[in-house]
Amino acid sequence: MSFSLAIVGRPNVGKSTLFNRLVGRRLALVDDQPGVTRDLREGEAKLGGLRFVAIDTAGLENVSDESLPGRMRRLTERAVEEADICLFVIDARQGVTPADEIFADILRKRARHVILAANKTEGSAADAGLAEAWGLGLGEPVALSAEHGQGLDELHDRLAPLAGQFEERARAEAPAVDVALQEGSEEDNTGERQAPPEWTPTAQRPLQVAVIGRPNAGKSTLINAIIGEERLLTGPEAGITRDSIALPFNWGGVPMRLFDTAGMRRKGKVVEKLEKLSVADGLRAVRFAEVVVVLLDAAIPFESQDLRIADLAEREGRAVVVAVNKWDLEEDRQDKLKALKTDFERLLPQLRGAPLVTVSAKTGRGLDRLRAAIVQAHAVWNRRVGTGRLNQWLAMMTEAHPPPAPGGRRIKLRYITQAKTRPPGFVVKCSNPEEMPKSYERYLINGLRADFDMPGTPIRLWLRGQGDENPWKDRKKPQPSKLKKHLKPGR
């Protein structure tokens, strides 16, 4: 990417719509109400022959206190100072407001390069606002309609001369950006993602880790502590995060992409459209993650919603790490930890053996253990077992506990092989697979987990009928009259 472009402006002027247009995907949430975007979101943008990093920012508001809008403004101002080019967006239908004039003055002082864009210029109602934009002293405004994709050619012409200044730097640095989540993934005949064998995280395809949990569990604070900077908006208010933000980071030599997600409340409490969009965005991050960190609040762990969230990660087939945050506030830690482990085994038997780590996002305590747990969970998630070992194991399992005999006919388990990893999936060839009780399937899965050191990871087991190996089974017998034509004379 040759340069970075920060899209800034007042709330509800169409910044996120323009960002989605430039990156070619609906990465940022869009809604009619102002103030939807709160965190900085980056994406790989394409405009004509230009390739650059687009940064969607929170709406600028004329506040400077410790309130949520004030913290959002400071985050946006930081993006302004770090970006190569700032695209200042105003609403042409509303015209230039006093706030626009204040922010134009800030950009003149802090930004390296500023391009003024007047959005929502479709129709004659925007003509007056487009003329007023000249008065901001930022040069000729670019007339845009992010909703309809109008004016992008003119924006390209304004960016192209500036982009040439950053090409040499781009070749030297080649920064990583938010690439498509689906890149490099495949699907096998089971309908689940499958990666090439012996895959390890690289800078081009890092390990994808999603942090999920209830609102105000400390997800954004935890990621800030991991990367060592205040990159995500945090505060005492619940539900600050709305978008799922992806942050590339090399954590202890392991390239990762960390996903911060919106807090997930019970479905019955989610009534607003914007919160539904936020939760759906978080679920999308979970589906494309490889390791999911379920973050709990040490004061109120394993509530019903926590159990639903952890079960969701398991059903999606992700490697799961359970992290208990705000551990610095606990006094009797040994007894608390013992109770946590007991509750974990009792309430989440489907994740028995998964890592349980205590952390403090505020002080940074326990982050090394969390990293080790993530790496270990990912290694187990990718584990492959040889077919010979599996069939020896199957013989011992059936000898110790023979399969049932529904209707007097015993089910015979003939063969087992590992069909996939990520998560581990096994195919068992047997007779009458449709009659196998779920309890015996759980017996086999628990045995696989215990005997091949796969604690906590989801395991998939598919039962397949043995099938008849006779290739002539379905072939019709030839009629006697037709046989005579093939018989040799004298026979």
Image (spheres, grey):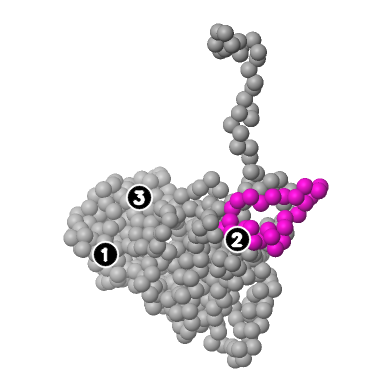
Front residue of 146 and 352: 352
The x, y position of residue 156, in whole percent, is: 27, 50
Dot in front, 2 or 1: 2
Badge nearest the viewer, 3 or 2: 2
- Residue type at tag 2: Trp
Nearer to us: label 3 or label 1:
1
The crowding category of the residue bearing disc 1, from other C-alpha atoms within 10 Å (few below 14, some 14 to 19, many at least 20), is: many
In this orientation, which residue lies closer to the viewer: 186 or 278? 186
**Can you identify the residue that label 3 sits on?**
144
How far from the left and from the top, in percent, is residue 410?
A: 75, 50
- What label does residue 84 carry, if any? 1
Circle 2 residue? 393
Q: Is residue 415 magenta?
A: yes
Q: Earlier in the sequence, mark 2 or mark 1?
A: 1
- Compute the Cα span from label 3 to label 2: 66 Å
Mark earlier in primary sequence (3, 2): 3
Task: Give the magenta part as a residue range.
Answer: 390-416
Is the residue under label 1 in contact with that under label 2 (CB below 8 Å)?
A: no
Around disc 3, counting alpha carbons within 10 Å, would you say few (fewer than 14), some (14 to 19), or many (20 or more)?
Answer: many
Q: Magenta stretch: residue 155 in it?
A: no
Tag 1, which secondary structure?
Answer: loop
Residue pictured at 38% horizontal, 53% vertical: 23
View extreme (right): residue = 407
Give whichever of 348, 104 is nearer the camera: 348
Q: Alpha-carbon distance for marks 3 and 1?
A: 21 Å
For the question of whether residue 392 can be seen, the reply is yes
* Quadrant of the image occupied by residue 358: bottom right
